[in-house]
Amino acid sequence: MTLSYPTPGMTAPGGPPPPDGFRTLEVRVPLGRGPGILDTAGETVLGWGAHRGAGLTVRATAPRAAPGVRVTVGLGPLRAPCEVVWTVREPGRVGFGYGTLPGHPECGEEAFVVERAADGTVTFTVRAVSRPAAWYTRAAGPLGRAARRVIAQRYARAVRRSLPGPATGAQGPPER
């Protein structure tokens, strides 16, 4: 099976631009400051913890995200097959992006990245670049886009819950 869209890597820093007709969703949430936040949040993201913590089922060919790993994410009866197309593990950034496979209700790519800024603030970003692929996602229109934003915020809450208590500053301000 191959990816269901023509531009792998479009959610990666410096990746190709999305094709016409694709929409971008970005949810960026501060996680706090302090040692260990980037590492803990990064491990949560790479180990599918954001997905499981958001209430989704995860069936993956590996316990951690890595290029070529296949994963099927589920919510109720809905199944969304994907393949990891890129990962990053640098001193100030950890994360991955996966692309949709045939059978996914969307067509595109989604990235999950934890970053530490120069001032020590750590953020978690979900970035999706997609368009509807199934009749029911096309029919959902704005309601479907709102649902994707809610799921992205649930990912962020799951990553936040994986962090140590407020002594580390991990609570941060509320989501936007």
Image (tube, rainbow, N blue to C red):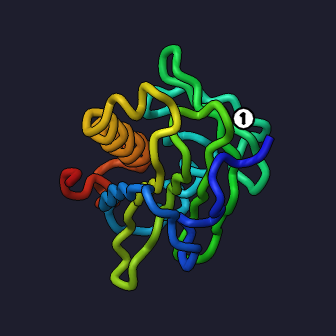
Residue drawn 42% across and 32% down?
137
Observer-nearest of 168 and 107: 107
Foreground of the two, 164 or 78: 78
On screen, residue 105 above or below 70: above
Quarter of the image that includes the N terminus: top right
Residue farthest top in this picture: 77
Quadrant position of residue 157: top left
Residue that carries the numbered disc 1 in the rendered image? 60
Please state which amino acid type lies under the numbered disc 1: Ala
Look at the picture and state if 51 lies above or below 15.
Answer: above
Q: Quadrant of the C terminus?
A: bottom left
- Mark 1: give few (<14), some (14-19) or many (20+) Cα within 10 Å: some
Q: How many numbered markers are drawn?
A: 1
Q: Estimate the x, y position of residue 15 in percent, counting from the top left.
A: 58, 74
Residue 132: give x, y in percent of width and height. Answer: 46, 40
Report the side of 121 relative to 106 (left or right).
left
